[in-house]
Image (cartoon, rainbow, N blue to C red):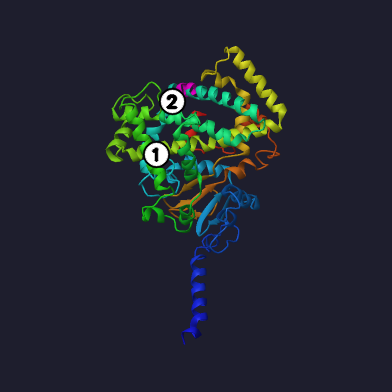
Amino acid sequence: MFFLYTPVVFVIFGCLVYYHFTRTFKYWQSRNVPGPQPLPFFGNIKNYVLRKSLAAEVLKEIYDEYPNEKVVGIYRMTTPSLLIRDLDLVKTICVKDFDNFDDRGMELSEKGLGTNLFHAESDIWRPLRSLVSPLFTTSKLKTMVQLVNERGDIFVKHIKQITEVKTDQEMYSLARKFTMSCIFACIFGLDISSDSNLLVEKMSKIDKLSFTRTFAQDLDLLYPGILKRFQSSFYNAELGNFFVNLVRDSMQAKNGIPSDKKDFIDLILEIKNQGNILETTKMEDMVKLIDSAKLTDEVIAAQAFTLYVAGYETSAATVAFMLYELAINPHIQDKLIFELDGVLDRHDGNITYKIINELTYMGKVFNETLRKYPILDIQRRANAEYSIPGTSVTIEKGTIVLVPTLAISHDEKYFPDPSKFDPERFSPENESKRHPCAFIPFGTGPRFCIGKLSD
């Protein structure tokens, strides 16, 4: 008898599953917001979920489909999100009305690496920002330039050695090695430039754990907030333990006393010792952080991890893309070399923090690289009901808004012939004609990427 009802059970079960994974799909239609038709389970990001496309590429396709709209309603799996196309709206949401959008909308457990600057909710983000910002003051950056120069000298010798054996080299992996050595010197004061160093061997595994997309990220799109509810995180426990131990070992190696290197661990030791935290630091935020968030080794490790992720992979990718463009555009390469030779001749061959401002063409090349190959899109979460200016759309508290930086930086309206690599887009004359939010590789508004402070 049971077998007679089996088909019925399967049909009912299938209907329930279908309903579950499409239950939100009338959200934007009921609000008269235009947008593409979503697919069950996948929403509008099927190729991203199936690892066929990057999220930025998927958002660009949607952006390009609606050239006359200010906003587009999309579904990231089952989560309704609002894609912002209008640059005035980008500025309003990220700058003018920032207090309504001061969270990124990524809720994680605060255990392990969860309490980090990138993912932190607004109440803890502000003191964490004050904790990290002093690392990017002028005096600190001058010291960092020296550290990077030292790694650069070692890297040049390494390049000469390996090219004697094999002329053609894969630059992305080399760029990753170089940026990793620089980041570890600036954060922990550690020299990992030697290939024989045991830390380098362990970092290859940590590297994969840091940048491999996990099921948890997809789960959060299906059920927003589930990771925090079940005290889960994007990040593997082994990754958290590695950075906690690295922080502890680094502080012990300094005997709890800040060194002259002025790396991130030195900054933490200054705070722990209640010393002078430089003129730009808000001491009240430091006190709040120490008293409330309990400046534990885990919290410190989470910030070190953020600096590592923000400075390592992103820098390596940008360097690799820039070298690629210089290789296929020799006239740009020649012009850049001419500028470098001239500046170095005027300064006796010394690379210092002071001469960076003289490298104006290099700045253009760097910016054009970030335009053509932006790192991340911008994500914000509404912390209250909000009416989108210039539209009839009102979004609910908790709604995610997205700013597609790849799509904007490849929009012919702002950058004619966007596939062409042209550093002169960033001449003072051309920049003055452009909307300030047409080029925001580090984000915009108070919650911009911490890396912008070193720009």
Residue identifier under label 1: 243
Direction from residue 276 to residue 162 in the image, left or right: right
Task: Name the disc covering residue 272, or none.
Answer: none
Please tell me which residue lies in front, 221 or 8.
8
Direction from residue 433 to residue 186 in the image, left or right: left
The residue depicted at 63 percent of the width and 24 percent of the height is 361
Foreground tag (1 vs 2): 1
Q: Secondary structure at mark 1?
A: helix
Q: Is residue 79 magenta?
A: no
C-beta proximity under 8 Å, tags 1 and 2: no
The residue depicted at 61 percent of the width and 16 percent of the height is 343
Residue identifier under label 2: 137
Please tell me which residue lies in front, 143 or 364.
143
Q: What secondary structure characterizes most of the magenta part?
A: helix
Question: Between disc 1 and disc 2, whose residue precedes?
Answer: 2
Q: Secondary structure at mark 2?
A: loop
Q: Percent from the top left, x then y, of residue 213? A: 51, 49
Q: Is residue 143 magenta?
A: yes
- Magenta span of residues: 140-146
Residue 53 sits above or below residue 161 on the image: below
Residue 349 sits above or below residue 404 on the image: above
